[in-house]
């Protein structure tokens, strides 16, 4: 039985504890919060017994085997390193670090300590996402892709009202790219690998907000990513709702799917043999067909990432090298590490082009 503690008391942390409590392989120990009463109440309400108010206390606890970090982005790397130093396995909410350099330091420390670190990027562990990936082979040569993920954040109302929020704060490595764009970036790399080149166009928040956000910060954006013979466009937002599905266009068929973070439906439209006609004629395609894909579904998809995290830990405990340990059916710990690093490398580049700088960037900010 893997004993898991959590850091943070957000909704996403509560959702994670739900799947921990539902699993026969894990047990919820307790939550860390700086507010002792909140730590006690949050822990007790979810069946835990050990509330924590100190990260050092949690990292040193013999009652904890692994830690889930649901804290603000800018705290992830330092908290992960402290837990690793205490011999804990760590599941880190996306993004794993403020930049690639931070994430690499975390992975290096984990490998040296012989513990598992994974990023909690739900779609990469979701069989529905992998059903979409498998279906790409039916499309013929892929030429274009459009990946969409945008949701209006209620915290943006705080910014509009002139109040600070950690969801839009350079000091905490947040913003649209880090919170929403990361889904489209990691989906891109999970589907097609790292692109050859990118061009980005962010939508920065108004300059008047910068005393609140501690610098230039994005509310939305688009990234164009190029591959040999193929182009992908990534669309993300925290200040508008993007209601479009995602789409991958091949020469033989087009795949459309809804829910980038949690794919819920998908279909393939085969073009058939397209005939020529006059300008006023309706274009017809002989043999055209549409097929709906059956996608697996669970109410809380964090169950998949938890299962893969536990599987990797069990493999390491059985003697596997950390990076070679299977983390579920879709890859090793090393594979998921490489996706995380490639994604942050791309996002670092996008932020440099936009002039978005986090404290963790240090001297690399203008490199």
Image: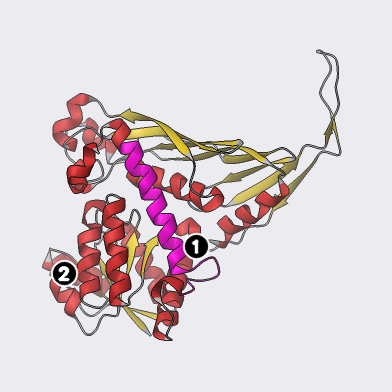
* Observer-nearest of 165 and 173: 173
Could you classify mark 1 by the number of other residues whose Cα lies within 10 Å: few (under 14), some (14-19), or many (20 or more)?
A: many
* Observer-nearest of 269 and 134: 134
Q: Which residue is mark 2?
A: 55
Q: Is residue 168 magenta?
A: no
Magenta highlight: main SS: helix
* Observer-nearest of 60 and 240: 60
Q: Is residue 191 above or below residue 349?
A: below
Name the quadrant of the N terminus: bottom left
Say which quarter of the image contains residue 80: bottom left
The image shows residue 100 at horizontal and vertical percentages of: 31, 51
* Mark 2 vs 1, N-terminal side: 2
Q: Is residue 345 magenta?
A: yes
Q: Which residue is mark 1?
A: 125
Whether residue 260 can be seen here: no
CB under 8 Å between discs 2 and 1: no
* Observer-nearest of 331 and 240: 331
First to last magenta residue range: 325-351
**Left or right: 133 with respect to 165?**
right
| Colouring style | secondary structure
Disc 1 secondary structure class: helix
The image shows residue 366 at horizontal and vertical percentages of: 22, 36
Disc 2 secondary structure class: helix
């Amino acid at each position: 039985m893997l004993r898991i503690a959590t850091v943070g008391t957000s909704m996403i942390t509560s959702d994670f504890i739900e799947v921990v409590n539902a699993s026969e392989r894990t047990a919820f120990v307790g939550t860390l919060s700086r507010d002792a009463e909140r730590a006690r109440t949050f822990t007790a309400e979810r069946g835990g017994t050990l509330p924590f108010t100190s990260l050092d206390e949690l990292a040193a606890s013999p009652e904890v085997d692994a830690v889930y970090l649901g804290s603000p982005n800018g705290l992830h790397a330092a908290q992960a390193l402290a837990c690793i130093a205490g011999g804990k396995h760590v599941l880190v909410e996306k993004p794993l670090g403020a930049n690639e350099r931070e994430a690499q330091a975390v992975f290096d420390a984990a490998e040296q300590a012989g513990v598992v670190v994974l990023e909690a990027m739900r779609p990469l562990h979701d069989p529905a996402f992998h059903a979409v990936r498998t279906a790409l082979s039916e499309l013929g040569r892929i030429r274009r892709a459009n990946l969409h993920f945008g949701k209006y954040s209620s915290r943006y109302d705080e910014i509009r009202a002139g109040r600070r929020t950690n969801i839009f704060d350079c000091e905490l490595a947040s913003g649209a790219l880090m919170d929403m764009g990361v889904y489209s970036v990691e989906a891109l790399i999970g589907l097609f690998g790292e692109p050859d080149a990118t061009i980005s166009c962010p939508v920065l928040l108004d300059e008047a907000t910068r005393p609140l956000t501690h610098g230039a910060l994005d509310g939305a954006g688009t990234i164009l990513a190029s591959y040999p013979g193929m182009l992908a466009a990534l669309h993300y937002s925290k200040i508008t709702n993007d209601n479009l599905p995602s789409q991958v266009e091949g020469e033989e068929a087009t795949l459309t799917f809804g829910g980038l973070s949690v794919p819920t439906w998908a279909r393939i439209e085969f073009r058939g043999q397209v005939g020529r006609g006059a300008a006023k004629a309706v274009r017809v395609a002989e043999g055209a067909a549409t097929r709906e894909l059956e996608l697996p579904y669970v109410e809380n998809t964090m169950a998949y990432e938890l299962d893969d995290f536990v599987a990797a830990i069990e493999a390491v405990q059985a003697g596997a090298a950390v990076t070679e340990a299977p983390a579920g059916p879709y890859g090793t710990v090393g594979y998921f590490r490489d996706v995380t690093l490639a994604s942050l490398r791309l996002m670092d580049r996008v932020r440099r082009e936009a002039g978005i700088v986090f404290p963790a960037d240090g001297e690399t900010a203008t490199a």
